[in-house]
Amino acid sequence: MTILVGRSRSREGTAAFTAAVAEARLRGQDLVVFDLDRTVHDEEVVSGSQLDFPTEVEGVSVSYRLPNERSRDAVGDLLDTAEAMDPSLIIIGIRHRSSVGKFLLGSSAQQILLQANAPVLAVKAEYSA
């Protein structure tokens, strides 16, 4: 089985990745990182050439997936990837949002929690004052 983590370049994304590595190691499973920010290029994903995109972390095999470059909906692409992969667990980072922010923009985390075909672990970044 495989664990799927939605990672972004944020504190929440880093917390999700850290939790995903720990969970994959605990379960003896591979890890697939879905890059929500679309910050890597196909050749970097395939080769694992970038230091930020290793193919193994703490004894866990890591591979990467990108959202569809024609799509504007990274969350929908993550859910499609989860549907195709059938992971044992999906891990996402979450952050506090104001009521107005939720109303105007919706909640990606809520969409994943409600529509995912696998259990979802929502991880928040450590609070720092």
Image (cartoon, rainbow, N blue to C red):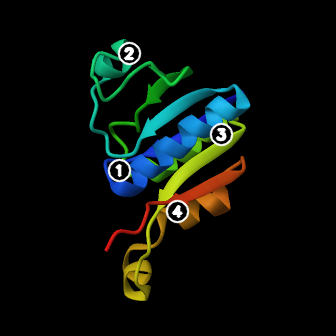
Query: What residue would you read off at disc 1?
Result: 72
Question: Could you tell me if residue 77 is visible in this image?
Answer: no
Q: Is residue 94 left or right of residue 80?
A: left
What residue did someone put label 3 on?
Answer: 83
Q: Which residue was labeled with disc 2?
A: 46
Q: Is residue 118 above or below residue 30?
A: below
Mark 2 burial class by Cα count in 10 Å: few <14, some 14-19, many 20+: few
Can you say whether 82 is above or below 102 in the image?
Answer: above
Nearest to N terminus: mark 1 or mark 3: 1
Q: CA distance from mark 3 to mark 2?
A: 22 Å
- For image coordinates 56% across by 67% down, the residue present is 110
CA gap, disc 1 and disc 3: 18 Å
Image quadrant holding the N terminus, namely top right
Residue type, numbered disc 2: Val
- Percent x, y for residue 57? 47, 25
The residue that mark 4 highlights is 109
Which of the two labelled residues, at mark 3 and mark 2, occupies the earlier sequence position?
A: 2
Residue 111 in the image, given as x and y percentages of width and height: 56, 63
Secondary structure under the numbered disc 2 in the rendered image:
helix
Label 3 or label 2, whichever lies nearer to me, is: 2
Question: What amino acid is labelled 1 in the image?
Answer: Arg
Whole-angstrom CA distance, mark 2 to mark 1, is 22 Å
